[in-house]
Image: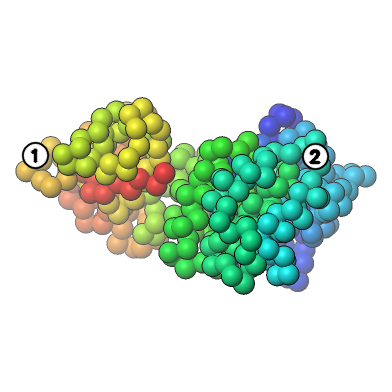
Amino acid sequence: MSGDQINARFRLDWSGFTLDVDLQLPGRGVTAIFGHSGSGKTTLLRCIAGLRRADEGTLEVNGETWQGPGCWVKPHKRPLGYVFQEASLFPHLTARGNLQYAQKRADPQAAVVSFDHTVSLLGIGDLLERRPDQLSGGERQRVAIARALLIAPRLLLMDEPLASLDMARKQEILPYLEQLRTELDIPVLYVSHAADEVARLADHIVALDRGRAVAAGPLQETLARLDFPIRLGEETGVVLTAQVVERDPEWKLARVAFTGGELWVRDSGHPMGDSLRVRVLARDISLTLSHHHDSSILNVLEGVVGDIAADDDQGLAMVRIHIGETVFVARLTLRSVAHLDLKTGQSLWVQIKSVAVIQ
């Protein structure tokens, strides 16, 4: 087993629900546990935390066995942090008191990040003397994440930490989560049913359906699969990593390069050479057999048709297009597929109506 790997195998029958998974996950970065409500996401996380004991199970985290034949590390002995949907702060303590409580539980030899650095990462310096009832939902959740980090975890579990927040609070906290992913070398298992959160935060994805893992792999490759088993509808799309190669101050645009091509995106202030993450939804792609110059669409790239597959909607089809080594996905009407007479291996032009910078 690789030293940077999480092996989790559980079988659990509970109240008519069966969890049956056998996963090999990266021991670094953010792995999204994705699926609809009732798919087993929280149950899986609770098995990993030891809060629910599976009938059969093994768990190895970066070379350490936490569960297996003849081995059971009790929940409070597992070096992990757990962030729930609700912040669950101690109401009688200030934010500082909640963080200090976590510090007292931590192994001082295993400290991942200092108190001051944690406070800075989560932007909670001006909240430390407030009690939980004096904080907004987003502020409480940031304090809860800081508390989980100060336990000095070797694994961080996050169970839909944004689910109870409104859109404004959600947008407030997402940049802090991105910063954690960038700066901390702690593997994170992030449960969500929101495709936009997964696209923005995850490096790897596991899709759960009715207690079973139905897809797993690197985010970019897995979302580009036409057979991705959890249909995302209007949220279907791909995520790319690109590098800023030009900034156009006149039009407030930036040109970013990815493997196989370039895109113009809104200038979000990233410096030259910086790496960023962009998302292109299938609904925002149209295809044409010739290059049109008299269009408002900035991003027109030459590509080759890969696979064509039926969509859940009977009038639509999904089309994979290869632009160099990068794959895009378009969602077209069956009429358009027939009109263009699309076939595997066919060259055409990909018109991208919108590109979202998500990091």
Taking the image as shown, residue 328 lies to the left or right of residue 70, namely left
Q: Residue at x 38, y 31 (%)?
A: 274
Please report whichever mark, 1 or 2, sits nearer to the chain's N-terminal start.
2
Q: Is residue 177 above or below residue 349?
A: below
**Residue indicated by mark 1:** 293
Q: Residues within 10 Å of mark 2 (few under 14, many from 20)?
A: few
Question: Residue 259, image x and y in percent?
Answer: 36, 28
Quadrant assignment for the C terminus: top left
Q: Residues within 10 Å of mark 1 (few under 14, many from 20)?
A: few
Number of the front mark, 1 or 2: 2
Q: Is residue 353 above or below residue 136?
A: above
The three-letter code of the residue at mark 1 reads His
Whether residue 109 is visible, yes or no, is yes
The three-letter code of the residue at mark 2 reads Pro
Q: Residue at x 66, y 36 (%)?
A: 27
Mark 1 element type: loop
Residue furthest left in the image: 294
Question: How many numbered markers are drawn?
Answer: 2
Q: Residue at x 46, y 57 (%)?
A: 172
Question: Residue 169, image x and y in percent?
Answer: 47, 63
Whether residue 319 is visible, yes or no, is no
Mark 1 to mark 2 CA distance (whole Å): 63 Å
Given residues 244 and 232, the one toward you in this image is 244
Question: Residue 192, image x and y in percent?
Answer: 55, 57
Mark 2 element type: helix
**Residue indicated by mark 2:** 108
Quadrant assignment for the N terminus: top right
Taking the image as shown, residue 338 lies to the left or right of residue 210, namely left
Q: Residue 97 has which mark?
A: none
